[in-house]
Amino acid sequence: MQMSRRHPILRARRVVIAITLAMAIATIVAPLAQAVSVRRTWTAHVSANGTVALTAYWAGNGTLSLKLTGLRPSTAYPMIAYRGSCSKPTLITNLPKAVTDASGSITRVWAVSTRVMNRIWRYGRTASFSIKIGSGTAARCGSFSFPVATRIAIPSLGIDLPIVKPGGGYPLCNVAMYIQELSQPREAGVTLLYAHARKGMFLPLLDRSQRNNGASLIGSTVRVWTSNDLVYTYQITRVRRHVTSLDGVFDIGPEQLWIQTSEGPRGTVAKLIVVAKRVGPGVAASHAAAHPVAHPVVCR
């Protein structure tokens, strides 16, 4: 498949998704994960009333969980997922009605169909969306969010970089970035973090890969921090050189971390991808450790 040097293309279940990166990435086909694998969990704080969690599964379905208090007793509240403002919402999809008990509380979990989750995913990958419970003056709203990668370190290579959300265009320097259309740490599927092969960034990965096809990288420890103040430990299992395309990445169910960098100067299509597996649960980290100050600059 021809790859644009400015706009690598991901093919995802018959849908071609253009990603504005200058980095093209790999073709890998892997077995699907178990149907119960969690693809993403969004959470929302609804005023002072409690929390809502929306969980998406690899099979396509999901669950909606409410734990709320302080509402009107024995009342049926309509619910919607929306974008925009609470006062003027743009509907994404209707959700089940929430019926409170005699004390004005509700603790319940609903199944969510694949059809409804597909509507959610249109916005849930790359944009913000919210939930509205009730209408008029009785309405309560909350914005959904989910943890994202914020820092990556490979101690044996002296790599330690903040991770920022990509903003489009040529990748920035002095930081790593993630592909927001893919997964985040601890989610089923592929988390892909990338940075330039420059001093102070991912250059040590490229240097090691050029010696015996990167054999010395196998087994190396990688740590990734997330925005909810957790740190995950990974171990490098595979080094892939001269990668030029990614086809079917959205069909890769097992949780994986891919670390990508360039193999040549600007405009070089072939990339290096290092694959790692998570080797333990998330461990609590300080907020400062998980949120390093980033100083991204435009590469020259």
Image: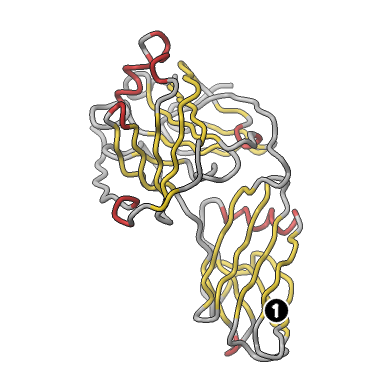
Name the quadrant containing residue 189.
top right
Label 1 secondary element:
strand
Q: Position of residue 3 (x, y in %)?
A: 51, 25
User: Which of 6 and 157 lies nearest the eye of the viewer?
Assistant: 157
Residue 126: image location, x then y, percent? 51, 52
What x and y, as percent, mark residue 271? 43, 22
Question: Is 237 or 207 nearer to us in this picture?
Answer: 237
In the image, residue 134 above or below residue 163: below
Q: Based on the displayed image, in which of its 4 quarters is residue 73 positioned?
A: bottom right
Residue 170, compared with residue 144, is above or below; it is: above
Q: Identify which residue is drawn at 73% across, 84% down.
A: 76
Which residue lies at the image location 26% right of the left edge and 51% below the top edge?
293
Identify residue for label 1.
78
Query: Which residue is found at the position 36% from the left and 36% from the top?
Result: 170
How far across and how far down the image is residue 149, in percent? 42, 46
- Tally of numbered tags: 1
Q: Is residue 274 left or right of residue 43?
A: left
Dot 1, how many residues are within 10 Å of its Cα: few (below 14), some (14-19), or many (20+)? some
Q: Residue furthest top?
A: 212
